[in-house]
């Protein structure tokens, strides 16, 4: 049902994009949208997550930097690195365990700019990686964890080489020992992000 609704909208937007592209010279490098094949893009942004779990009152803030390369129009692969600060507590058998942590992480992402009109776009992305913290995270787990992040967002043109990015992501953190394992108190959270995207 959703596909039936979105398909006509997609065709309309593609038609608008094609008409606009024909009216603009592609000889100038600055006229080329940074959603095009062969483009390299750098991004810097902040993410802030809130835990979904009733016994884990933890917020996570991340400062991200990423490099993306468009292997096809609107399809890019990215390397992502970040600094992490976690604040809050975890409740275990009526004990309130401090969950303040610091860490570093890295991930690989695939991003698709689904709909775009020159420098504006709506995108979805999916990434997997690892994070390392100064203490076990969440408390009772391990100092290293795997991560999964996925979400959607907007790129809003500032000029021909830069844009604002804003969006939403879901993040899962766990050490892979399995659901319900006593040493794997995973963390699920929803978050918002915002920052800048630069064409290189």
Image: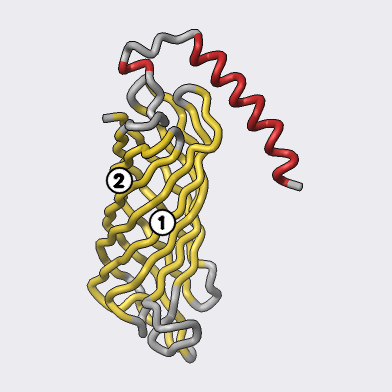
Is the residue 111 above or below the residue 184 in the image? above
Q: Residue furthest left?
A: 134
- Residue drawn 30% across and 66% down? 131
Of residues 187 and 116, the one drawn nearer to the viewer in this rendering = 116
> Quadrant location of residue 178?
bottom left
| Label 1 SS | strand
Of residues 61 and 22, the one drawn nearer to the viewer in this rendering = 22
Of residues 179 and 29, the one drawn nearer to the viewer in this rendering = 29
Of residues 171 and 79, the one drawn nearer to the viewer in this rendering = 79
- Residue drawn 28% across and 61% down? 105
On the image, numbered disc 2 is attached to which residue?
A: 66
- Residue drawn 43% across and 80% down? 185
**Numbered mark located on residue 175 in the image:** none
- Report crowding for label 1: few under 14, some 14 to 19, many 20 or more residues within 10 A (C-alpha): many
On the image, numbered disc 1 is attached to which residue?
A: 127
Is 37 left, or right, of 8 in this rendering? left
Locate the C terminus by quadrant.
Answer: top left
Say how the picture is coloured. secondary structure
Is the residue 102 above or below the residue 17 in the image? below
In the rendered structure, are the residues bearing label 2 and label 1 in contact, judged by CB atoms less than 8 Å apart? no
- Residue drawn 74% across and 39% down? 5
| Label 2 SS | strand
Q: Measured from the top left, where is residue 127 in percent x and y?
A: 41, 56
Q: Measured from the top left, where is residue 118 in percent x and y?
A: 47, 22
Q: Measured from the top left, where is residue 189 in percent x and y?
A: 49, 64
- Report crowding for label 2: few under 14, some 14 to 19, many 20 or more residues within 10 A (C-alpha): some
N-terminal of the pair, mark 2 or mark 1, is: 2
Is the residue 152 above or below the residue 14 in the image? below
> Quadrant location of residue 52?
bottom right
Q: CA distance from mark 2 to mark 1?
A: 12 Å
């Amino acid at each position: 049902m959703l596909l039936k609704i979105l398909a006509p909208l997609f065709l309309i937007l593609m038609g608008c994009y094609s008409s606009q592209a024909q009216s603009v010279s592609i000889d100038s490098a600055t006229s080329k949208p940074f959603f095009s094949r062969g483009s390299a893009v750098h991004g810097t942004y902040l993410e802030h997550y809130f835990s979904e779990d009733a016994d884990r009152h933890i917020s996570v803030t991340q400062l991200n930097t990423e490099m993306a390369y468009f292997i096809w129009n609107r399809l890019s692969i990215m390397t992502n690195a970040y600094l992490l600060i976690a604040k809050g507590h975890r409740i275990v058998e009526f004990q309130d365990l401090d969950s303040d942590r610091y860490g570093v992480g890295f991930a690989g992402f695939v991003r698709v700019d689904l709909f775009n009109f020159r420098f504006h776009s709506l995108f979805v992305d999916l990434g997997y990686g690892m994070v390392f913290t100064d203490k076990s995270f969440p408390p009772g787990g391990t100092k290293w964890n795997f991560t999964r992040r996925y979400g959607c967002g907007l790129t809003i043109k500032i000029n021909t080489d830069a844009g604002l990015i804003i969006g939403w992501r879901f993040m899962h953190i766990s050490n892979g020992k399995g659901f319900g394992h006593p040493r794997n108190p995973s963390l699920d959270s929803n978050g918002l992000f915002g920052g800048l995207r630069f064409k290189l």
